[in-house]
Structures are given as C-alpha cells and as structure tokens.
Image (spheres, rainbow, N blue to C red):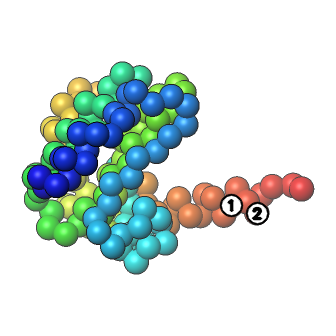
Amino acid sequence: VEQFWRFYSHMVRPGDLTGHSDFHLFKEGIKPMWEDDANKNGGKWIIRLRKGLASRCWENLILAMLGEQFMVGEEICGAVVSVRFQEDIISIWNKTASDQATTARIRDTLRRVLNLPPNTIMEYKTHTDSIKYVLWGIEGRVW
C-alpha cells in the first residue's frame, strides 16, 4: 500500500485531464478487458459524474479498494475512471455478475464511500452484455 501511494502521489488527477482519457486500476494479473478470465463472468457498476467530482471519487474508490471496505473477498477485479468532455464515469468491476447479493453489497458500499446522493443513478452492466452490444454494433454497420 505504501509503495502504491508513493507512485500515486506523482500521478495526474482525473480532474486535471482534458479530452478523452481512462485510468485503470486492477489487481495484479487481471487485465482491464471483458475477456480476461477473472472478468468474463462478471460485470461492473457504472456511475456518471458531473465534471469536477472525478478526482475525489476516484481517490475515495481507490482507498476503499485498498482498505478492502467492500467486504466481498476476492470479488473485486478493479476500477476505471473515464474522463470525457461532458461528464466523467467511474466503474468498479467484479468477477461474478450472477451473484446478486454480492453486486448489491458492492453497490451499497460504492454509494457510501463515494458519498453519493440517494437519487444518483447507478447502472450494473454484465460484461457479456457489453460484448454483445459491441458485436451487435459491428455486425449492424453498413460499409
């Protein structure tokens, strides 16, 4: 953990980035790809943030992951912050999309550690659905 924070303290914060950028923080050996063995049966919670909130939320999420606040064992695979022009997006990836109790616990912990208002929309998307959506988009194109 100490080694991580030495590295993290020198990184640019998400709120200081411009344009289209992504930061990925995944457990060692897990790639931030739907097809990775650890991710293929999983999914992710997605939260869309208005500009100006990403840096605080990203840091709180990292602290919660490192501090094992989610209390779901090895279920957490990693997290992503995506900086976009109109909004920023934070997502946390887990191994087992079919385990509703675990996904609910992750959602509730995420809401708490990010201090999200009760009306914040949180979307859970399985990686299988993400892959289908991309494949459908590719197959549906007219060249």
Foreground pick, 94 / 102 = 94
* Looking at the image, residue 86 lies above or below residue 33: above
Q: Kindly report the distance in space between the C-alpha atoms of the residues bearing marks 2 and 1.
A: 5 Å
Asked whether the beta carbons under mark 2 and mark 1 sit within 8 Å of each other, the answer is yes
Point out the image quarter for the C terminus. bottom right
Residue at x 51% of width, y 33% of height: 84
* Looking at the image, residue 138 lies above or below residue 15: below
Residue at x 25% of width, y 62% of height: 76
* Looking at the image, residue 90 lies above or below residue 86: below
Q: Secondary structure at mark 1?
A: helix
Q: Kindly identify which residue carries mark 1.
A: 136
* Looking at the image, residue 77 lies above or below residue 122: below
Q: Which label sits on residue 139?
A: 2
Q: Is residue 133 left or right of residue 31?
A: right
Residue 10 position by quadrant: top left
Residue at x 23% of width, y 26% of height: 117
Residue 30 at x, y = what percent? Answer: 35, 70
Residue at x 47% of width, y 66% of height: 34
Point out the image quarter for the N terminus. bottom left
> In the rendered structure, which amino acid carries the disc numbered 1?
Trp
Q: Can residue 105 be seen in the rendering of this structure?
A: no
Q: Secondary structure at mark 2?
A: helix
Graded by Cα atoms within 10 Å as few (under 14), some (14 to 19) or many (20 or more), the crowding at tag 1 reads few
Residue 77 at x, y = what percent? Answer: 30, 63
Q: Is residue 56 left or right of residue 70?
A: right
Residue 92 at x, y = what percent? Answer: 32, 52
Q: Can residue 24 be seen in the rendering of this structure?
A: yes
Q: In the displayed image of the protein, which residue is found farthest to the bottom?
A: 37
